[in-house]
Image (spheres, rainbow, N blue to C red):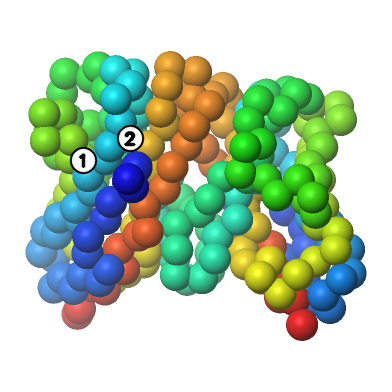
């Protein structure tokens, strides 16, 4: 089992609904990442946190996606409203600091009906 | 232009043989890092090996080695003595910039080890 904890493992919801994912990084890791991985493709970085601050969210669709890491530890990624095209694997990763290798969670597989 | 290019969608290798997975990258930043990850069918991304742009020697980690050719902007992964458990998707990735703000993954190569 991955050291980075993610929940839920699977999520099925209808379009227009809200959905949230949770991530708890490895203890002491200052940097946290959220990725979206569409089936058959490589992960795409959505947002990167350094402690509680966002350092890059240039690929985050901000009209419907939001992310927070209020205390600089665990993090939540939210989608509202969900669209059919949001069906994907959402991966969370953490690293000790930004230049270091990232350690990934098991991911949340999202299906939008 | 693609930041990371993996041109082999699928590869097959006989058990106990070596295999090379190709990766080329595109950056004008002098400071960057290159990573390889393995993703089994279960979905978790597993870090394999890292090469920094200023590293003089090729990185090695057990059965994994990285063939780093800076002038050609290639960072191929070599897996020696393939095992059945090596069957998975393999992703090449790049951290661009000294502070690591930009991180890019390739499209992956599916490796199948044949008994």
Quadrant where the image shows the C terminus of chain A: bottom right
Q: Residues within 10 Å of mark 2 (few under 14, many from 20)?
A: many
Residue A60 picture location, percent across and down: 67, 45
Tell me if residue B108 comes above or below residue B10 in the rendering.
Answer: above
From the viewer's perspective, tell me whether residue B57 is left or right of residue A21. left
Asked if A42 appears above or below A75 in the picture, the reply is: below
Q: Is residue A77 left or right of residue B82?
A: right
Q: Nearer the viewer, residue B100 or A5?
A: B100
- Please provide percent x and percent y for residue A16: 87, 71
CB contact under 8 Å: marks 1 and 2: yes
Looking at the image, which is closer to me, A32 or A42?
A: A42
- Residue at (82, 37) in percent of width and height: A68
Q: Position of residue A7 (x, y in %)?
A: 77, 58
Q: Which residue in the protein does label 2 denote?
A: B34
Chain designation of label 1: B
**Residue at disc 1, secondary structure:** strand
Q: Which residue is mark 1?
A: B75
Quadrant placement of the N terminus of chain A: bottom right
**Residue depicted at x 46% and y 50%:** B46
Nearest the camera: B49 or B32? Answer: B32
10 Å crowding of disc 1: few (<14), some (14-19), many (20+)? many
């Amino acid at each position: 089992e991955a050291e980075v904890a993610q929940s839920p493992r699977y999520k099925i919801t209808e379009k227009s609904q809200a959905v949230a994912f949770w991530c708890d990084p490895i203890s002491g890791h200052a940097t946290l990442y959220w990725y979206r991985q569409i089936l058959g493709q490589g992960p795409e970085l959505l947002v990167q946190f350094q402690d509680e601050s966002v350092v890059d969210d240039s690929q985050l669709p901000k009209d419907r996606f939001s992310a927070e890491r209020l205390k600089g530890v665990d993090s939540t990624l939210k989608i509202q409203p969900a669209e059919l095209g949001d069906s994907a694997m959402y991966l969370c990763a953490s690293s000790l600091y930004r230049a270091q290798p990232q350690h990934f969670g098991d991911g949340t597989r999202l299906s939008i009906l | 232009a693609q930041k990371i290019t993996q041109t082999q969608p699928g590869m097959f290798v006989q058990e106990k043989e070596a295999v090379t997975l190709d990766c080329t990258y595109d950056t004008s930043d002098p400071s960057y890092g290159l990573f390889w990850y393995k993703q089994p069918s279960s979905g978790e991304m597993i870090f394999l090996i890292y090469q920094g742009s200023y590293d003089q020697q090729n990185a090695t980690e057990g059965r994994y080695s990285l063939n780093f050719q800076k002038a050609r902007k290639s960072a191929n992964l070599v897996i020696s003595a393939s095992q059945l458990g090596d069957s998975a998707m393999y992703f090449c990735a790049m951290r661009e910039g000294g502070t690591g703000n930009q991180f890019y993954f390739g499209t992956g190569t599916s490796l199948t080890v044949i008994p």
